[in-house]
Amino acid sequence: MTNSPNFYYEYVYKLVSTLFDLSYLWFVVKYLETKKRHPKWHIFLQTMVYLFVLLRFLPSSEFIKYLNNIRLQVTLFLYFVLGFWAWYKQNPFAIFFILADSVFLLGIIANIALDIFKISNDIFNFGDIGLILQQIFFAVGLATKINILNKEKQETQKLFVLQLEENQRIKDQINEELERKVKERTLEIKEKQIKIGEYNEELLQMNEEMKQTNEEIRSTLEFAENQTKIITNKNKHLTDSINYALRIQTALLPTEDEIQKHFPEMFILNKPKDIVSGDFYWFEDKKDVQILAVADCTGHGVPGALMSMLGVEILDKIVNEHHILDVRWILYALNIEIRKVLKSEQTKTHDGMDICIVSVDRKHGILEYAGAMNPFFFIQNHVFNQIRANKYPIGGRIMKEKQEREYEKHTIMFEKEDHFVFYLCSDGYQDQFGGEKGGKFMVKKLKELLFEIHEKELFEQKLILDSTFDLWKNNEEQVDDVLIMGIKI
């Protein structure tokens, strides 16, 4: 029967896998710039992928089944060949593409080998590790690409400035030369009035020289306009790359609709300093318990965004693979994983994040909180409360007394009839400079504002927080990413 569950499952599988193939193809051609750098490969690769997409929806036969069975192998082979071809053609972005697909393939091969040789492995899923490393290499590749574009932009700007200086020097030189010649000709006119014919010839000659000079100036201005267009295109290319990184970061974060299924009254105020953000929020539903977090990673912009993507991946792994649901042990495990991934002991890096995390058990009326640097604000029955976080971050500098940090858990009880609203915040809002004296907003003023608006609808609270921030900032530059999550139970 065409209406059987298997039919719908097969149709959805075909649709989802088709969207994945087309999305990955789009990423490859944009990342390796195949249309510009490798046009023949661009046409061939698109043709092959579209052909395999078409095969999924053709009537089933033994030959069609065979082609669909080898589709993944052929596609991966084509991407590998394209990657090595691009690397051979000195495409600067190809090496990260090769490394990303290689580690992903090695992870899959490792899992297959474990299955073939029946080796027990309950600790690591090499496929997931390969996928994480693939995303890291892609992220590093994107960062490298953006860095190269930045350098090209800086070089173009330097060239443009030098050209403007040269233009000014030429114009000054021409003006001086014209002034000198005018003085000389004026003197000759006064001394040789009887030589009108010679004077006219000299005037004509000067006119020709001026035309030639004007032509040189026009050519110089045209060159300057072309350089301006080049800089504009470079800026657009850089902005497009950062916007693409934003789409990747957004895809990793939960949507507000997912959170509103469990907490209908909630808001998320997310104001990145740049296009992409070093702040991120995270959510996971575990039947009777929902876990939420807001984190502030080291830096902002592209470096902060890379750390945020890493934080999301590790939190998913801790909760969904290791099944750790206690908030303090989630932070404990997150600190260890961050330091392990960043090789903090070997590289002496101080990168990390500040984070506040809560678990909500509405069935039993229990909320548990743990924090690394970021405090927890909640208002219960119109009484404002603050719980301070532990004074050491996730990752960051190595503690002299011990390297494995323990985080304190705080438990809050509530009843169904309570008026209970809580806020998870990064420090960007209170650290913003502005106001009449150009000072910081400060956490005290933020707490007063939260208490003042806590009885309003959550969407209205978001609007007030947003407008208050913009009014305070006024013409000042935004100093950091801003992220506030408000939830009413």
Image: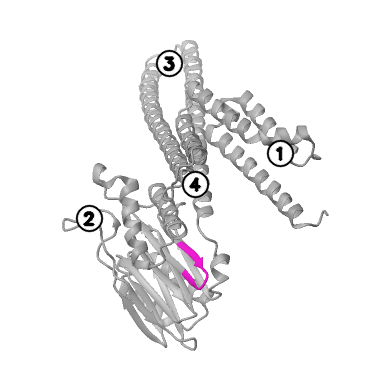
- Ranked by sequence position, the earlier of labels 1 and 3 is 1
Q: Report which residue position mark 2 lands on.
A: 403
* Residue lying furthest left: 401
Identify residue type, mark 3: Gln
Disc 1 to disc 2, C-alpha distance: 51 Å
- Ranked by sequence position, the earlier of labels 3 and 2 is 3
Residue 245's tag is: 4
Residue at 30 percent of width and 67 percent of height: 440
Image quadrant where residue 475 sits: bottom left
- Looking at the image, is mark 4 or mark 3 nearer the viewer? 4
- Ranked by sequence position, the earlier of labels 4 and 2 is 4
Nearest the viewer among 234 and 134 is: 134
Q: What is the x, y in percent for residue 356?
A: 36, 66
Q: What is the x, y in percent for residue 320?
A: 47, 59
- Magenta residues, as a range? 282-290
Q: How dense is the environment of label 1, judged by Cα within 10 Å: few (below 14), some, or many (20 and up)?
A: many
Q: How dense is the environment of label 2, judged by Cα within 10 Å: few (below 14), some, or many (20 and up)?
A: some
- Ranked by sequence position, the earlier of labels 1 and 2 is 1
Asked if residue 470 shows in the view, the reply is no
- Looking at the image, is mark 4 or mark 1 nearer the viewer? 1
- Looking at the image, is mark 1 or mark 2 nearer the viewer? 2
Identify residue type, mark 2: Gln
Disc 1 to disc 3, C-alpha distance: 89 Å
